[in-house]
Image (cartoon, helix red, strand yellow):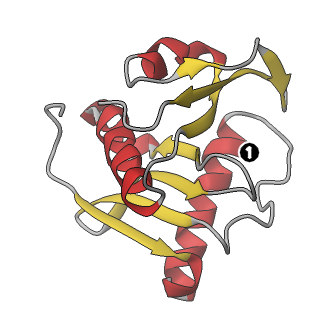
Amino acid sequence: MTDTVPYTIDVRRMAAFSAVELYALLRLRVDVFVVEQACAYPELDGKDEDALHLRLLIDGETAAYARLWQPENRAPRIGRVLVSPGHRRKRLGEALMHEAISACEAHFPGQPIALSAQGHLERFYRSLGFAPTSGEYVEDGIPHIDMQRPAGHS
């Protein structure tokens, strides 16, 4: 693992969040993906209820987050990956992805893991065992590439 600040891991379904916790989580996602990245798109896409929500918490605050879900008849996916602006210099991105991969392996055993990576992060995801499965395409004004990590990759 990486040399990061101490954090706790919280993985749960949307129904297990209090209204205040859920509001804070969704606000963080909108702040990063819609406001900071200047992307007008449907952040609340109807997939949250069936997903697992993985948070790295520092002093009770969401420092990093990823959404894990399995679309019908497809590989489990890691999405909505973010590190909170106030925690970005703490090397949490790699820790978050290691935790997300571990959670996917525990909840969706024996299956590959897919994600849609922003193009500038392809090298980062390759370092975690993901390989491209598509060419680059533009989604919501940002270059992306589909990637997948084989089942059982260590």
Inspect the image, locate mark 1, and give the three-letter code of the amino acid beneath it: Val
Q: Is residue 116 above or below residue 22?
A: above
Between residues 129 and 137, which one lies in front from this camera angle? Answer: 129
Viewed as shown, does residue 82 lie left or right of 72?
A: left
Residue 65, horizontal then vertical, whole percent: 46, 52
- Seen at 37% across and 37% down, the residue is 152
Viewed as shown, does residue 17 lie left or right of 59?
A: right
Indicate the quadrant where residue 122 lies: top right
- Seen at 63% across and 50% down, the residue is 31
Viewed as shown, does residue 54 lie left or right of 31?
A: left
Residue 33, horizontal then vertical, whole percent: 67, 43
Q: Is residue 68 above or below residue 10?
A: above
Residue 12, horizontal then vertical, whole percent: 45, 74
Between residues 63 and 110, which one lies in front from this camera angle? Answer: 110
Q: Secondary structure at mark 1?
A: helix
Residue 147, horizontal then vertical, whole percent: 61, 25
Indicate the quadrant where residue 4 lies: top left
- Seen at 22% across and 64% down, the residue is 59
Q: Which residue is mark 1?
A: 34
Q: Is residue 76 above or below residue 15?
A: above
Between residues 119 and 90, which one lies in front from this camera angle? Answer: 119
Q: What is the total number of numbered labels drawn onto the structure image? A: 1
Viewed as shown, does residue 112 lie left or right of 115?
A: left
Between residues 126 and 4, which one lies in front from this camera angle? Answer: 126
Crowd class of label 1 (few under 14; some 14 to 19; many from 20; radius 10 Å): some
Identify the image quadrant of the C terminus.
top left
Indicate the quadrant where residue 1 lies: top left
